[in-house]
Image (cartoon, coloured by chain):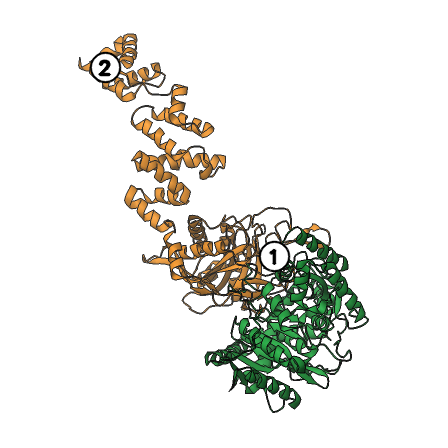
Amino acid sequence: MTTPSDGAAREKYEMVVGLEVHVQLRTRTKLFCNCSAEFGAPPNRNTCPVCLALPGSLPVLNESAVELATRAALALGAEVQEESVFARKNYFYPDLPKGYQISQFDQPLATDGGLVIGERPDGSPLRIGITRVHMEEDAGKSIHDRFPSATAIDLNRAGTPLIEIVSEPDIRSSAEAGSYCRLLRQVLEYVDVSDLNMEEGSLRVDANISIRERGSTRLGTKTEVKNLNSFSGVERALDAEFARQVAIVESGHAVEQQTLLWDADRGAVRPARTKEGSDDYRYFPDPDLPPLRLTKDWIARIRDKLPELPDAKRRRFAAEYKLGTYDIDVLTASPRVAEYFEVVAHARGDAKTAANWIMGEVLATLKNTGVSIERFSVRPADLATLLDMVRSGVVSNTAAKRIFALMVESGDRPEQIAEREGLTQVGDDTQIDVWVDEVLSSQPAEWQRYLGGEKKLLGVFVGAVMKKSGGRADPRKVNQLLAARAGK
Amino acid sequence: MTSPAAGVATLAEQHGAGNVRPAATVSAAFARAAEVRAGPDGLNAILALDRDGALGSAEELAHRHQQGQRPGPLAGVPIVVKDNIATLTMPTSCGSRILEGYVSPYEATVVTRLREAGAIVIAKTNMDEFAMGSSTENSAYGPARNPLDPTRVPGGSSGGSAACVAAGIVPAALGSETGGSVRQPAAFCGIVGVKPTYGRVSRYGLVAFASSLDQVGVFGRTVDDAAIVVGAIAGRDRYDSTSADVQVDTYQSPATEDLTGLVIGRPREYFPESLDSRIRDRCDAAIATLRELGATVRDVSLPHTELAIPVYYIIAPAEASSNLARFDGVRYGVRGAAPSLREMYERTRSGGFGPEVTRRILLGTYVLSAGYYDAYYKKAQEVRALIADDFRRVFGSGVHVLFTPTAPTTAFPLGTRSDPYDMYLSDIFTATANLAGIPALSLPVGRVDGLPVGGQLMARHFNEAVIFRVAYALERALGGRSA
C-alpha cells in the first residue's frame, strides 16, 4: 500500500545490499566423486556410494573443479590462496545425504576481489567488493509436489561443484545490484566456467539487505532474500524488501533478522520455512580432505591462460576498431560474439561494416531463430567473404542481404550462392554498354533533356539500366558509362 | 588338515604349494568357531558368517592356483573382519541397531586387498557400537567375551576380532582403531595388534567414527601373522585422500634377534606411580630383554601425555557427531516411522543409537557449537599438536622405538566399568599414538593372574618396519615366558 508520505520516507533511507551468488561449475563429474554432473538425468541415476553418503565412503577432490574455481576467482580480481581448507557445514535435511555440506569456511579459496560496475557521479569507479570466493558441493533436491503426502529425494545434484561468490555490502540500489549481477555473469561467461543458466539453477542469487538513514554508516538488521530467479527479479525483490523495511522502521518497529522468499507472481516476499538447526552449522575442518594447496606457479599458469576479460576487451575495441560505446557494448556482451566480430573485421579490414552487419543481420537472425552464435550456420569467414564481395563490386548491397539469408538457411558459401542464384554483379563494360544503349534508345527525349542540363535525370537512367540488368549491373560502372556518353 | 592357528605364512605356503586345500582350512576355521562357541550363545565374537561364500572362494582360489596363478601372501588364509568394514556378502552393522541388516553395495579397499592377496573373509566380528567403547560391551548385539576367561571382556572396540584370533579360529583379523581399539583388545586377549601410521592403510569402506584418528588395524596370533597382513593392505588408495603415497616396506623380518644400535625409549609418563606394579614388572622385564638383545634403553619424557584422554574425548566425539549425521533414516538402515520429518529423525536416531553413541554425539555437538568451538575443539587441536610434538622431539633425539604398557589393567570382568570415565581410562596409553598419527603395536609380554599383559611399541610416522623388527626379536626372546 502506497501513501503519499512513502516517497518522502524512502528518500530518507538507503538500502545496503550484499549478494551471494552460487555458480555451478561446468565439470564432467561431481566435486568429490566420479558421478556425472550433468543436468536432467532420471532421478538418482547419477549417484554412487560417495554422493549417497553410504557408510565408509570418502570424498576425493575433483581437480578440474579447482581449476575452474580458480579461473573464476582470478577473473573476479580475487586473490587465490595457496592454502584453503574444506570445512563441514552441519545440518539435517533429507536432501543433504551426509548431514553436512562440504564447503569452505574460514579459509576460502580466494579473497578480496571486486568488479567495477560503472562510475560514480564524481567520475570515480563504482566498485563492488568481493569478500570471498569459495568452493562447495551442492545438495540434492526435495520434491514435495510429486507424490501425495510424501517427499521425494533426487540426489543427482548432490555433490555437484559450486562456487559461492560473496560480495561486500557495497550495493546501494536495485539498479546497482542488477548491474553487478549482469557484469558478474558476463565475466564468468568470458572465463567459461559455467552454463550460467538461472532456470536450471546453475546460477543462483541470494541477497542480504538492510536499510539505514542516508548519511549513516551504521548497518541495520539485515534480512536474506532467496528464490531470486532472474536478475530483474533481484531488482524487484530488493525494491519490495526495501519498501517493507522502510515501512517497518517508519512505523516505529524493528526489522527482524530472517530469511525471506521472493514470490515473483505476487511481487512480494514471504518468510521462509527454516531448516532444523540452521542457526548453528558447527563448522569444522573436514578431516577427510587435506588442506587444498596450490603453488604460486600453478596459480600463475591459470592466470596466464585467462582470456581477455570484458573491461580489457572494451578498451581494446575502442582503440583498435574506433567503434562507439554502444557498438562496443553490443559486440563485447558475449565473448563469442566478440570473437565472431573480430574474425570478420580482420578478414574484412573494415571494422565498422563488420560491426554493422553483426549488430544488424547476425544478431537479429540469432534472436529470431534462438540459435547460439557457436552453432550459427554462417561462419565468420564466410560473412567476411560476403562483405568483401560487396566492397569489390561482385555483388550489390541488396544482393548481399539476399545471399546472407540464403547462407543462414543452407550454410553454403556466399560465392556458391551468388553464382547459383545469378546474383553476381555485372561489371563488364561491354554488357553494361548494351543495356545503356537499349535504355537511351527507348528514352531519347529524356536523354536530350539530360544533355540539355537536367542533371537530376541521371538517376532515372541509372535506375532503368539497373532494372534492365535484373539488379546485377554494378551501379558505379553504370554511372561511369553514362557520364562517358554525356561527355561525348 | 592344517589348523587355522598354524600361522599365516605356513598356511599360505601350504595352500600355494597345493599340499592343503584352502577349503579344508576354511572348514577347519568354521569347525573351530563352533567348537569354541564363537556365536551369540558363547563368546558372541561373530555377528555374521559367510560359510557358502567362503567355501566358494576357497575352491575358486584352489582352481586359480591350478590354473597357474601365483599364490598371494595370504593364499587361502581365513580372516575375520570387524563389522564396521564394508563387505559385499555380509551385513555391515557397526554393532548398531541403526544399521541392522545393512549390506554394503561396495567393498572396503582393505577387503579388496585381502582378497587380492588370497585371503578368505569368513566372518564379521562383534564390536562396540560404531567403535565407541573399550570392552565390546556397547554392542547392540550383546557383549563379546574373552576366550581366555569368558567372564571377562575381550577389550574393545575390536573385541570380536581379537577374540576370534585368540580362540584359534583364524590366524589374523582386521580391526579398527580410533584410540587403542586394536592394541588394547590385543593386550587383553594375549595376541599381537597393530595400528599402522595414519594414512598407511586406506580408510575407504571403514565406517567413520573420528576421521582424523581412525585407522584400520590388524590382529595376529604372532608378530609374523600381523606383519604379513599389514603388508598386504598397506599403501596409497586413490579413494582415500588421507592415504599416503609412502613406500610400503617389507615388514617380515629376517631371523635376527640382534638389536644392537637401536635405542629404546621408556617414557616415564607411561609408568606412573599408580600403575599396577605387576604390569610395571612385566614391562620392565621386557625392557631388560630388549637390553639383553643389544638395544640401548633410555628414559625419556612425553610431558603432554596426561592430556591425551581429555583431548581425545573432545576431538573424537566432535568428528563423530558429524560423521554419524548420515544415519538419518532417509536412505538406508532402520527408519523410525513418524508423521513429521523432525519426529522421523528423532525416532530413527533415538531408537537406533545406544547410550554411549548418543552420549558422544551430544558431547561432540556441544564442543563444536558456536561459542564453544574455540574453547574446546580448537584448544584440543592445539594440545593435540603438542602431543605430536612430544613424540617428534623424542624420535628426533635418537630414540627409535618407545616401549610402554599397552593398557593400565588386564582384561576386566564384564559389567564392572559402569562409569564411562573409568572405561575411557582404558585407553590412556594408546590414545596418544592415534592423536599423533604414529604407528604402534601391542604384543604379549607376560601374564598377571593368568591374564595376558600387553607391551606397546611406538615409532615415528611410517616406520612400521622398526617396530616389527623389535617385535619379532622380543617375541622370540620372550617365547617361553609370555605364552
Label 2 sits on residue: A450
Q: Which of marks 1 and 2 is nearer the N terminus?
A: 1
* Residue type, numbered disc 2: Tyr
Residue A321: which quarter of the image?
top left
Colour assigned to chain A in the rendering is orange
Residue at mark 1: chain: A
Q: For chain B, what colour was chosen? A: green
Badge 2: residue crowd in 10 Å (few <14, some 14–19, many ≥20) = some
- Which residue reaches farthest right? B41
The quadrant in which the N terminus of chain A is found is bottom right
Discs 1/2, front: 1
Q: In the image, residue A368 lies at what x, y percent?
A: 48, 35
Using the image, name the chain to which the residue with label 2 belongs.
Answer: A
State the mark number for residue A51. 1
In front: B406, or A50?
B406
Answer left or right for A292 relative to A269. Answer: left
- The answer to whether residue B365 shows anywhere in this view is no
Depth check: A425 or A329 in front? A425
Tag 2, which secondary structure? helix
Task: Assess disc 1: are there few (<14), some (14-19) or many (≥20) residues with their C-alpha within 10 Å of its C-alpha.
Answer: many
Farthest residue, direction bottom = B273
